[in-house]
Amino acid sequence: MKSKITQQEIGKRVASLRKNKGLSQEDLANRVGISRSAITQIELGNRSISALEIHNFSIQLGFSIDDFLGEEFVLNPKLQSEVQEESSNTRVSVPKLQVEKFKNVLLYILENCAGKPNVGETLLYKLLYFSDFNYYELYEEHLSGATYRKLPYGPVPKNLDTIIKKMIDEGELQRIKTEYHNYPQTRYLPLRKADLTKLKASEKEVIDKVIDQFSDWSAKAISDYSHKDIPWMASKDGKEINYELVFYREAPFSVRNYQEED
């Protein structure tokens, strides 16, 4: 199928039309006869769409193929206003770092697993990442508000070095250099307890589940695992990872039961 618009733009248009119809990815996949993962990849701009598929999409989503492939395509004005209203009222994707919250999340994680010999810097970053992104998927609001970048060994919170240095200077953390299986390892030990009054019960529950799931993993295992998570995969190297991408997750990464909601 030839088109002047990009594959990424086609994906955005499919996603917008699907949401305006009130359809889940699973709903649309069943209607057009492809897998949900195929829908995910199309909407992310990672997969091309055949002529037959776009014909099926046009039937299910109610659009003209000529209009859809036009450079000036816009959503129905009524639907567009509904999307803007929903976006402004329900979901805020731009994170704003809450330094004290982040520090207490970090301390709480270390309280529970800093004594494990495998928990070095790499694993700690992933525990923070999955805590923040799993919470956002479940509740559509930020836990610590940390912004993560896609770096070679996995997602890393921005400003982490500055926060850790301040916590070390203020006697809240201790940094130690060790070896683990003959590899150099940087570890952090908490020198004070986390203030649990700063964490909601729902936040603590998500963090506990992340600790239970991942704190015994090796750095390589959790790095490999994080590289298969949609927010990581769909982001560009060195750039910020968009929290909204959690809503494209599938098993085993997704922590939300979308079928029950549907």
Image (tube, rainbow, N blue to C red):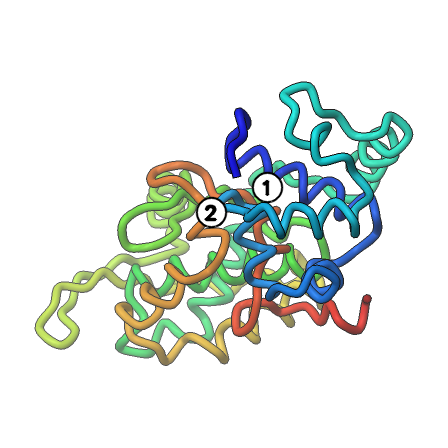
Q: In the rendered image of this protein, does residue 113 appear above or below residue 6?
A: below
Q: Quadrant of the C terminus?
A: bottom right
| Visible residue check, residue 170 | no
Among numbered discs 1 and 2, the one appearing first in the sequence: 1
Judging by the rendered image, the residue that carries numbered circle 2 is 46
248 sits to left or right of 172: right
Which is more toward the observer, 156 or 170?
156
Judging by the rendered image, the residue that carries numbered circle 1 is 11
Residue 94 coordinates in the image, percent (x, y): 62, 36
Picture mark count: 2
Q: Amino acid at mark 2?
A: Asn
Mark 1 is surrounded, within 10 Å at the Cα level, by few (under 14), some (14 to 19) or many (20 or more) other residues, namely many
Q: Amino acid at mark 1?
A: Gly
Residue under the image location 91 percent in, 29 percent down = 78
Residue 23 coordinates in the image, percent (x, y): 79, 55
43 sits to left or right of 224: right
| Visible residue check, residue 262 | yes
Label annotation for residue 77: none
Residue under the image location 51 percent in, 33 percent down = 2
Residue under the image location 55 percent in, 59 percent down = 38
168 sits to left or right of 88: left
Mark 2 is surrounded, within 10 Å at the Cα level, by few (under 14), some (14 to 19) or many (20 or more) other residues, namely some
Which is more toward the observer, 51 or 185?
51
Residue 195 coordinates in the image, percent (x, y): 59, 60
